[in-house]
Image: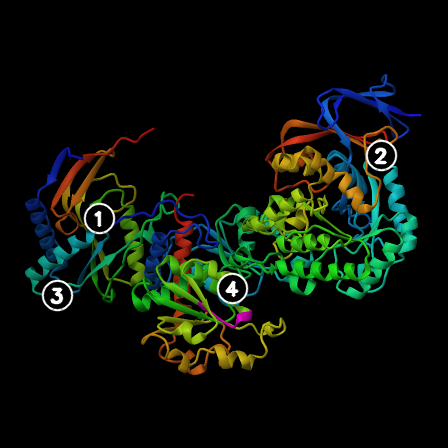
Amino acid sequence: MTAPTTLGARPRHLLDFADWTPERLTALLDNADTMNQVLDRPVRKVPALQGLTVCTAFFENSTRTRVSFELAARRMSADVVSFAAGASSLSKGESLRDTVEVLTAYKVDAYVVRHPASGAAHLVARYSGKPVINAGDGRRAHPTQALLDAYTIRQEFGSLEGLTVAIIGDIRHSRVARSNAELLPKLGARVRLCGPATLLPADLAALPGVTLTTDPREAVRGAHAVMALRLQQERMAGGYLASLQEYADHYQVSGALLREAEAGAIVLHPGPMNRDLELSSDVADGEQSRILRQVENGQAVRMSVLYHLLVGRE
Amino acid sequence: MTSLTITHIKRPGADRLESVTTENGVIKGWNLPPEGEVLDGRGGTVAPAFIEPHAHLREPGQTQKEDLASGLAAAAAGGYGTVVSMPNTSPVVDDPATVRALIEKAEGLGLARLRPAAALTRGQEGEHLAELASLKEAGAVMFTDDGRTNENARVLRLGLEYAHSLGRVVSVHAEDASLRADGVMNEGPVSEALGLPGNPAAAEAARVARDLEIVAQTGARLHIQHLSTARALELVRAAKARGLPVTCEVCPHHLLLTDEALRSFDALYKVAPPLRTQADADALLAGLLDGTVDCLATDHAPHTRAEKERDLLEAPFGIAYIELAFPLMWTHFGERLGLTRLLDLMTAAPARVLGWPVPTLEPGAPADLVVLDLEAEREVDPRTFLSKAKFSPWAGETLRGWPTLTVVGGRVAFRG
Amino acid sequence: MTPKATILSADEVRRALTRIAHEIVERNKGAEHLALIGIHTRGIPLATRLARKLEELEGVTIPTGQLDITLYRDDLSEVAHQPILRETRVPFDLARRRVVLVDDVLYTGRTVRSALDALIDLGRPEAIQLAVLVDRGHRELPIRADYVGKNLPTARTELVKVKLAETDGVDVVELHDLPEERP
């Protein structure tokens, strides 16, 4: 018996998981193991993407995500150019298309895009004609975060098949929740989305493999992984929350809530954390927490994503 | 004395080829000996030129998007003889001098006729009535704060009463701004899956319900623009059954497209009110068939390509296809509606809404005519649009039934 | 697909490995500080077998490891599909080790070039040597093997297929004609 050596034609982009089969997603997570080995060596670099140029185009600030991607690309020997555009270039009236066309003229081979508008990564893909990795677009998707979440859970349990993952917080505005709700069921897990009714759009129940509940105990009961989402404090101004205290009192992932979960359940958070708001400090620092592991895994997963998108003929 | 004769044309529903002669801007008669310029109608169907009750021509102030010349040329190419322009320009059309200037400029163009709507409130701010009587004298045919929503119900009530006394209709963009919030598309499973802020159907229905109560209270005429939801249509249907003096319009894009189109993340499909569900589109078509919907309007809302290539949060609302209105409706709904009803929805119905004489083909009527080739099939090529907005969701689609000739006041405004 | 020739039988494979083991001991004056690292896929069982023979000969434990060179290939932009990455496992310190890289077939030399780069990124061995079961010629890089089971002149239109019990259920080396490329 010989192992299969190829996975068929690669998807062109990682915008969301629509074009990604469970087999390729599994291979991508498998390959992240190899990338983690590379990160454990004295020389944390391989020549796989030598000669290619990756552009991190961040239309919204996120130093952590950008650093993770840039390190991942450099460890694969790609050249990295970073483009950061704040509100300033929008007010200058330069369209997204103009920006992307200028960057593409610099001979960029692939884009990593962060943008405040849902769908912007799709537009960059259309305008650039180059492979695009979505590093977070509006509320829409943050696929590499979901992949590193899946990878971290898999590291713990070996497989996602049959697991239950509870995601608690501001589901409405969360691209992390949407991407996990798309990815985890593809890998065999059930997803429970939980938050106050104002932050939990009922229409999300239409997603396959996903259930909604406003009761955190119900969400966590029997779960193998519990993810707390960052609560953006400006949601107060939007009228979604009566007070932060009200939120923390009823939805904080605390030791007491965690006891409802499966024994050995792990705790995740996409960062950056509001300690003692969405997550109690004792849980964040407790032995069930895998939050720092997630950060470590992020780099390996992103290296694997770059490998899957950029290695091989187009 | 200028005369024009169009030969080889059929009146709707007839098979016989006839000719019509116009003189000094009115129809002189049928099958007279040809005089003046003679045009061959090539067997097309003739009808009174269409009336567009709702278009954004962007002049003054936003002429990078459209101007009177391009907008009225596009309208003529679409078979329209008359366009009611919306006042949400820069500056807002809320003073008589601007109304006069627009009319004067449009008359010199020899394209479709311009009939400006003026703002109901100063600056369309919704707080102080504009000088409606003076605006009427200057030529404003309708009052509306379209582009904005009339959040202050008391001011709208006063405006309705005042406009009614002047014999002018008020039209409203009926959406509750606080419920609509930052929505950029219909709220539903699609918006949630795409992570785009949704605009709930309730925003339209709630505002229509409020405005219908004001109509019931005052008895003043109200026209509701671009209805998009089944629920709001139901409210209008009930109000008409009560005998309230309310009319409404529907746009072809709300019949032909749904929120599924947003899965492309293409801001071409970002319109206000948003594209809804197939159930809503079906209900609107039923409303056209049973008469609840009074007329069609395209809400021609051109923007520059760069603006529409922005992301969905940044791009402006609006779609422009006045040149395609008839082919789209005839291709997709010609069989369901029939030619007579479709022509009525695009000509006599808007005239009734606006309180104008119903256009006819009888001698003495204004010589505003469109000739349609009901069989012609052609691929939509936005590069050929006369509008400045040279892009379209229907690019590359083959449509049937195209205007070949538009005559306005006895002069050729468009020849295809 | 039937082979046009059998190059090495199971017995011949065994004898070739035995000879290589002796040569390794001779060249290195014993087996101290030796380590064997097999290149995926068939270099790995070959390395394991050689290690066993060395242990029998010298009575010392020979550390073994395995190397996946995919991330070091010089043709990654050309391959049609992404190769699956396999495990690299070198569970010992390379410093002061004399490492014998083991592969089944030496052909253009590009795989060995990749393996040298990969190995050096893992540490700094005292020396690196190369053992192969078959050297079929047609080098594209200045690389040669220190230990060769069988030198086999071939044409580029031919394919040398090594089958091993661990991976293929049988020990044999065959010569095939490459399937003709379809136009």
Q: Nearer the viewer, mark 2 or mark 3?
A: 2
Tell me the amino acid under the disc marked 4. Ala
Distance CA(mark 4)–CA(mark 2): 54 Å
**Label 2: chain letter:** B
Residue underneath mark 3: C61
Whether tag 2 and tag 1 are in contact, CB under 8 A, the answer is: no
Kindly give the residue lying farthest to the top in the view shown: B33
**What residue lies at 31% left-to-right and 76% top-to-bottom?**
A263
Distance CA(mark 1)–CA(mark 4): 47 Å
**Label 3: chain letter:** C
Q: Is residue A288 magenta?
A: no
Task: Please tell me whether mark 1 sits on a helix, a strand or a loop.
Answer: loop
Q: State the extent of the magenta-drawn residues as a range.
A: A193-198
**Label 1: chain letter:** A
Whether tag 2 and tag 3 are in contact, CB under 8 A, the answer is: no
B269 relative to B403 in the view: left or right: left
Residue underneath mark 1: A2
Badge 2: residue crowd in 10 Å (few <14, some 14–19, many ≥20): some
**Label 4: chain letter:** A
Q: Nearer the viewer, mark 4 or mark 2?
A: 4
Tell me the amino acid under the disc marked 3. Thr
Q: Which mark is residue B110?
A: 2
Tell me the amino acid under the disc marked 1. Thr
**What residue lies at 29% left-to-right and 41% top-to-bottom?**
C140
Residue underneath mark 4: A202
Badge 4: residue crowd in 10 Å (few <14, some 14–19, many ≥20): some
Whether tag 4 and tag 2 are in contact, CB under 8 A, the answer is: no
C32 relative to A34 in the view: left or right: left
At which x and y percent is residue A133? 48, 55
Q: Nearer the viewer, mark 3 or mark 4?
A: 4
